[in-house]
Image (spheres, rainbow, N blue to C red):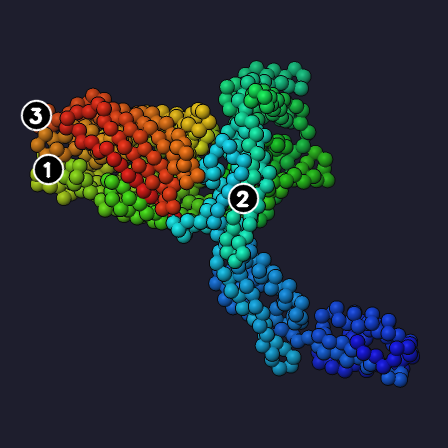
Amino acid sequence: MAAGTADAAVVRQIKVDGLQRVERETVLSYVNVNPGDDVSPEKLNGAFKKLYTTGLFSDVSFDVKGDVLTIKVDENPIINKRFFDGNDKVDDKMLESEVQLGPRSIYTTAKVQEDVQRILNIYKRVGRYAAAVEPKVIKRDQNRVDLIYEIDEGPLAKITKINFIGNKHYSDSDLQGEILSKETRWWRIFSSSENYDPEKSNYDKELLRRFYNNHGYADFRVVSSVAELSPDSQSFVITTVLEEGVRYKIKKVNITSEIPDMNTAGLADDLDIEAGDWYNAAKVEKSVYALTEELGKRGYAFVEVEPELDRNMQTGEMTINFRIKEGARVFINRININGNSRTYDEVIRREFRISEGDAFNAAKIRASRRNIENLNYFSKVDIETQPTSDDNKADINVNVTEKSTGYFNVGLGYSTVNGALVRTGVTENNFMGKGQQLGFDLGISERSQDYNINFTEPYFLNRPLSAGVDLFKNETDYQDEASYDEDTMGGRLRLGWKYTDDFYQSVRYTLRQDEIKNVHPSASVYIQEEEGKYVGSSVGQTLYYDKRDNAVDPKEGYFLSFGNDVAGLGGDEKYLKFDVKAYWYDTFFDYYTLKLFANGGYITGYDDENVRLSQRYFLGGSTMRGFDSAGIGARDKYTNDALGGNWMIYSGAEVMFPIGLDEVGIKGRTFVDVGMLGKPDDVSYKIVEYSDKPRVSVGFGFSWLSPMGKIDIDFGFPVVKEDYDETEVFRLNFGTSL
């Protein structure tokens, strides 16, 4: 600021120089000086600050000579056009929604720097912490400029290491398997799990809490979780400090009621947890929900079931008391859903276990949140209760943050049976925002090719019915086992529904064409007879009962299924088929997991039709380790071709255990396999070797989550077999999803 005098003076005339677009009256309104006013350095200094902070001017000065005040200004230019250059990973629309400056905005250096920081923050949100932005200005006539943000997006910040401190009972690899964030590996080139995302990292803490709480550790907490950015801003090391606490076993489970005259008899049947179990927060929550449902059926709409945990840290025992209390008489007014720009409201609403107008029920709301999270469409789900003007009503606000639901996978692998293999697939789990699943899968190996397309509508006809269609084509080389090749193509319609969260059923209709071809001239006469194309048309159903703690890597619980199929609705095949499976898991000594299993199957033709080769059972390889693929069962005496069987039993036991290399993902196992395979229809013992006596094998193996993917190695040793059975001591499987 410049002034011609340091003393106050009376101004008779005011001049404004340098104006191009700004009106003279606009300047005078900020100066607040009129002819006849006294002006002083202090008053002019205040006027200077007001003019400068408008952002209209790059320079302002005052000059007082005699009774004339001259205000000189340099106007900031107007932005003519604004461009983003170099932004391949973030589109213009996202950047435009964040930056302030645009066409016809007033250009200032300060605002440009603010926008640069906004752009950098956008890139941090998408995991590019090394991004750089350089603003460039091109001057135009009439005091206009073009503004260009030149962007160097930089690489995605990867997670190079995930450390855990304080985990005494579970290895780093165990915990890494429970969280969303993953360490960078070359085979995850098409995956986003190795990219650092603060929201994902924060959700990992919740996943760790659930994991420990569901395995007995009720006092578990995450002390801290720190993500350290590398000096080059291209990678992170995440270190999480844990406090596991005591693992509690349930000593006693009680149900008490504060409601007068309530009969609690029979309520214990609805509990999902009992004395002798390890504490499991999910089962406690499930029990709360089941009790609330049962009490509602008994006429108690406004109740709260509160689980009280009485811990004994010295003995590691816990008593759980489910206390039933009177709840507030509040009804649901509205359920509001926010944040779902892509997903339809109905997709979210149908996961609610409570509706508008229902009595408020905290357990059902928690169950609804869990259902929405399990959709895996959202990175964040928050449900909050908002009071209304009516004390007896409340609104439920559901706030979601959508995430990508499409996946592109590439798999590489090797097995001693199929050789090298490649598998690729594309899956969209929220197709068109309607909650539908659409997928395509292709697998190619040295001995087989398979193609699959599938579509699933989880709420068919707006009911909790899962309906879907599958199209498939498989080409397999069985020359080594039985001297033929097989091509299969067809489609399947399916429908499924749940009776409870654990008990569900599916029905299906399958139409397929099987072709037995390239039969070797010296193949078994039974195989030569089946050369050609055959059409099969069948209907079937399967019942499932699943009480496992984890469907992917179970450590406790059991799984049962029973299925049957009937072929003969047109086509060339007529058969009845029955299959049953049972699996049981338990953990002992904290680190060891016991798996017991039994599978059985039976198929028979009717109306004088035999069961064809493509529908028979075969044992060996991955089923019955220690025996070659199709190494057990009936064989042609002269060609040694495997003929399969019309019934089978396959059972065994397996123990998984640590071998001191958990930090690199290696676990060991021992196993016992027992199997029996019945003979096929219409075969002559004169030319077929056959015995339905049990075969037994024992062995050991390793699983390694290697940098190249999961590798399974098994050594199997037959201890009970027939002379003509074909054995295989060593089996290797390697594969990964990228």
Mark toward the start of the polypeptide (1 vs 2): 2
Comparing labels 1 and 2, the label whose residue is closer to the camera: 2
Q: Which of marks 2 and 3 is nearer the N terminus?
A: 2
- Most foreground residue, 316 or 608: 316
Q: What element carries label 1?
A: loop
Q: CA separation, marks 1 and 2?
A: 62 Å
Residue 66, compared with residue 499, is above or below; it is: below
Number of dots carrying numbers: 3
Q: Is residue 133 visible?
A: yes
Given the image, on which type of amino acid does mark 3 rest? Lys
Instruction: Kindly identify which numbered label has been placed on residue 686.
Output: 3
Q: With 433 as the anchor, is 648 left or right in this view?
A: left
Residue 251: image quadrant is top right
Please name the residue shown 31% across and 45% down the image. Answer: 413
Q: Specify few, some or many for label 3: CA neighbours under 10 Å numbering under 14, 14-19, or 20 or more.
A: few
Percent across and percent down for residue 407 are: 42, 49
Q: Which of marks 2 and 3 is in front?
A: 2
Say left or right for 165 vs 589: right
* Disc marking residue 523: 1
Q: For numbered disc 3, what is the local secondary structure?
A: loop
Q: In this view, does 138 lie to the left or right of 524?
A: right
Q: Which residue is drawn at 46% across and 30% down?
A: 549
Kindly identify which residue carries mark 2. Answer: 239
Specify whether 596 is left or right of 354: left
